Amino acid sequence: MTSETRVAILGVPIDLGAGRRGVDMGPSAIRYAGLSRRLHDLGHHVVDFGNLATPMVETTPLPPPDARLRYLEPIAEVCQRLAELVSDIAAQAMLPLILGGDHSLAIGSASGSARGRRLGLIWIDAHADFNDETTTPSGNIHGMPLAVLTGRGHLRLTGLAGKTPAFDPARVVLIAVRDLDPLEREALRTSAITVFTMHEIDRRGMAAVMEQALTIATRGTDGFHLSFDLDVVDPREAPGVGTPVSGGISAREAHLAMELIAESGALRSLDIVEVNPILDERNATAELAVELALSALGKRIL
Ligand SMILES: NC(=[NH2+])NCCC[C@H](N)C(=O)O
């Protein structure tokens, strides 16, 4: 039996933070895969707030080729509005479920959720998204949100929670990472973030890793925000993502992680990001995204 949650769906169709087009169609693809109806069938009260208005590449001035923070202004503006909305939704005792969109949007969603409360952060992703303008090889802001949320990055982005850092690095866990840029790796090594790479998952198993992750994210906190990038799943099972990396977790391991998150009872808000329908195979990745959201919100086989 799942306990009824009031779930607020919010789409953020943005791809300005990514180097490749297409993840702006993610919210549509995930809705088309039946998200709202299936959450309702699971016993939740679901309200779809529609999509946040977002600028698109075609109507936004092109950043200079050497930009270290591509599309900073439009992304900061979207994240600011998103933070307001997520904070309002959370204040109404609803659980915000944010559909992406590229991962830069987590700067807004996680900051908004962390306003006025002390949250842990669980980041499940093939990448660490721990670059800043001095370490980024691409200038793409979707490679930076975890750095921003732990206090490192441009001032337009780091203050959206009303406190900096939005999250205490000691309460932040990064899971299933397997692709780091050289300077990003150094920054991660000296941070207080707990990192479980693919190596730890292979070695100790997802259940043991998640158990420890949940302890870290919930100790002394009011719960946690989950940011889930579909590219964490192996591209054989999740081909429709913007930046695929081979050697990922299986869909089963992803489900196990989500089920343990649901069992913790401490999930306060979540993002499901980086679904790219252009690269997908008959919407399989969006369908997986829906299945995983259901697991995170209490779906059980028996
Ligand atoms: N959310 C993502 N898909 N991030 C990919 C980041 C790739 C690379 N590390 C960069 O900073 O450009």
Image (cartoon, rainbow, N blue to C red):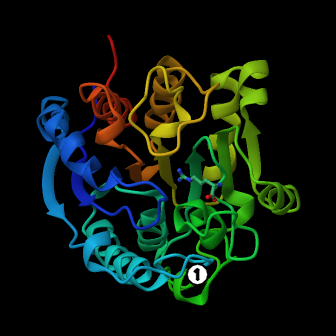
Q: Residue at x 77, y 29 (%)?
A: 200
Residue 92 shows up from this direction: yes
How packed mark 1 is, by other alpha carbons closer than 10 Å (few <14, some 14-19, many 20 or more), is: many
Q: Measuring from the top left, give residue 244's x and y in whole percent.
A: 53, 37
Look at the image and tell me in which quarter the N terminus lies.
top left
In this rendering, would 272 be left or right of 36?
right
Hey, which quadrant is residue 170 in on the image? bottom right
Residue 159, horizontal then vertical, whole percent: 55, 85
Instruction: Classify 59 as above or below 241.
Output: below
**Residue lying farthest top?**
302
Q: Nearer the viewer, residue 38 or 244?
A: 244
Instruction: Examine the rendering and report whether any part of residue 91 can be seen.
Output: no
Q: Which residue is mark 1?
A: 158
The picture places residue 231, in percent across and down from the top left corner, at: 51, 38
Which one is in front, 136 or 111? 136
Determine the image quadrant of residue 21: bottom left
Q: Left or right? Give the position of 208 relative to 2.
A: right
**Residue shown at 45% from the left, 28% from the top:** 259
Q: Amino acid at mark 1?
A: Thr
Q: Outermost residue, bottom direction?
A: 155
Q: Nearer the viewer, residue 128 or 235?
A: 235
Ligand 1 is found in the corner quadrant, namely bottom right
Question: What residue do we see at 14% from left, 60% from top?
Answer: 50
SS of the residue under disc 1: helix
Where 224 falls versus 197 (above or below)?
below
Residue 109 falls left or right of residue 95: right
Position of the C terminus by quadrant: top left
